[in-house]
Every structure is written in structure tokens, then in C-alpha cells.
Image: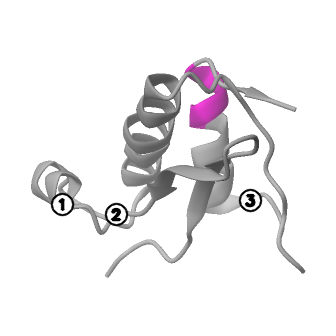
Amino acid sequence: MFLLFDIDIIHRGRSKVISIATTNVRDLRNILPSLIDNDAASVIGSKLIVERSKESDVYAIAYELGKNERIEGILRIILDTIQKNGIIFV
């Protein structure tokens, strides 16, 4: 079972996808004991999104909520982890 969400970080100026957050990444599947808990969400936020964003010189992002979407649960953990690791939300 995998976390059921999709977070794409897209560079606004170049329209280039910088990062896609999912537990369906081989190297993460091998190091995480569980792919559906809060620790997995935290690792996804820091390893996938923060590291790849910083590699692409992106230090500020905007998150657009989907229709009827609320920032809670796993999504809250991921967004908090991103912010704690130096990415600014605008």
C-alpha cells in the first residue's frame, strides 16, 4: 500500500517538473519500514521535495489546494517538513 497523494513541484518560469512526491520510489521502498506512516511522509517531504528543490535552486514554493482538499493528516506532515527544511511557502 502506498500513500495516496501526488505532489508535483513545477518551476513556474521554466514549466519544468522538479520533483514528484510519492513512496513509489525504489530507493525509498528499500529504506523505509513502512510506506504509509507519518515517518514515511516526513522522509518524502525532506528527501524528495526539499533536496530536489534545492538542487534546482528553488527555495520558495506555492501549494495550490485541490477542490475540496484540506491541509491535514499526511499532507500536513509533508508540508510542515518542507517548511522546516528551509523551503518558504509564498
Q: Residues within 10 Å of mark 1 (few under 14, many from 20)?
A: some
Residue 57 to residue 37: above or below? above
Q: Nearer the viewer, mark 1 or mark 3?
A: 1
Element carrying mark 1: helix
Return the x and y of residue 37 as percentages of the image width and height. 40, 60
Task: Work out whether mark 1 precedes mark 2 in sequence or the reverse, and give the earlier one.
Answer: 2
Report the quarter where the C terminus lies: top right
Q: Confirm whether the magenta stretch covers residue 64.
A: no
Where residue 75 sits in the image (x, y, percent)? 64, 57
| Mark 3 lies on residue | 72
Mark nearer the N terminus (1 vs 3): 1
Residue type, label 2: Thr
Extreme residue in the front direction: 14
Q: Nearer the viewer, mark 2 or mark 3?
A: 2
Decide whether the magenta segment is chiefly helix, strand or loop: helix
Q: Is residue 46 left or right of residue 78?
A: left
In the rendered view of the protein, which quadrant contains the N terminus? bottom left
Dots 1 and 2: beta carbons under 8 Å?
yes
Q: Residue tagged by mark 1? A: 29
Boundaries of the magenta span: 81-85
Q: In the image, what residue type sits under mark 3?
A: Glu
Q: Which mark is residue 23?
A: 2
Circle 3 packing at 10 Å, graded few (<14), some (14-19), many (20+), is: few
Q: Residue 28, relative to residue 51: is it above or below? A: below
